[in-house]
Amino acid sequence: MFPVVERRLRYAYIEAAERLDHGTATDSKISIKTGLQRRDIAKLRGEDVPTQSKRQPLAEIIALWWNDPAYDPKGIPIQGGDGSFTSLARCIRKDVHPRTFLDILIETGTVSETGEKVSLNARSYQPAAGSDDQLAYLADNVGDHLETAVSNVVDAAKNYDMGVHYEGLSVNAVTQLDQHFRSRMRQTLEEMDTMAQEFPASEDGPHRFRAGGYFFDDRDRKVNSDDP
């Protein structure tokens, strides 16, 4: 997936440079502004823009399960008619057996199976580590973040991209900050998810958005290093 992210970054630089010149920039001018090679710019400008990965049916299932009152997150029957996991899965895809979806969701820890019922463990689908789904999300998330950051630098845009950073902190201090960030970010993203789901049909349109956050720290790196 790194080549996908790399292409997204290159496209971000080219598009930002083109916007800065109102679409009239030559390959040479873009090369001077971005540092990219002219041959790469010419090739990329002649290709289709990298598309976003389509939303996965597993994510669709979890989103519907969480938001539709017909399906209780605390538990629904696996088999049956309305309100069952079978009917839920078939609302999303009719060409895949519901048990196939369920087995993957159980394997990733998103869903728990108890007897003849299943319940939600998470509000969103979390792909297995190293899976194709996870790598696809990585490419999309990093690609959009890079495009946001690049447009702010090259095109003087005002897209939201903020951060805070400190050095010289203890493991305990960083752990507390990490926990606080996770709690507040989860709350914010869940509120945005609910808000997006509740927009009326009149808000349908061609636009999309992606919002998220990250928390980097070097706790593991310091533990496994001989450096002070």
Image (cartoon, helix red, strand yellow):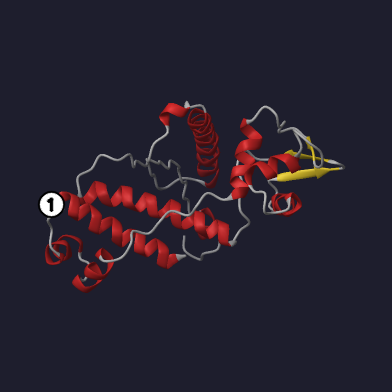
Placement of 197 over or under 14, stated as above or below? above
The mark tally for this picture is 1
Residue at 69% over, 44% down:
89
Residue at 46% over, 50% down:
216
Q: Which quarter of the figure has residue 123?
A: top right
- The residue to which callout 1 is attached is 21
Depth check: 129 or 182 in front?
129
Q: Residue furthest right?
A: 115
Residue 225 horizontal side relative to residue 32, left or right: right
Placement of 20 over or under 91, stated as above or below? below
Give residue 183's position: percent from left, percent from top.
55, 34
Q: Residue furthest front?
A: 94
Q: Which quarter of the figure has residue 48?
A: bottom left
Depth check: 147 or 23 in front?
23
Give residue 95's position: percent from left, percent from top.
67, 53
Q: Which quarter of the figure has residue 39?
A: bottom left
Give residue 228's position: percent from left, percent from top.
47, 60
Give residue 184's position: percent from left, percent from top.
51, 32
Depth check: 125 or 198 in front?
198
Residue at 39% over, 55% down:
143
Amino acid identity at mark 1 = Asp
Q: Residues within 10 Å of mark 1 (few under 14, many from 20)?
A: few
Residue at 54% over, 36% down:
186
As helix, strand or loop, the secondary structure at mark 1 comes to loop
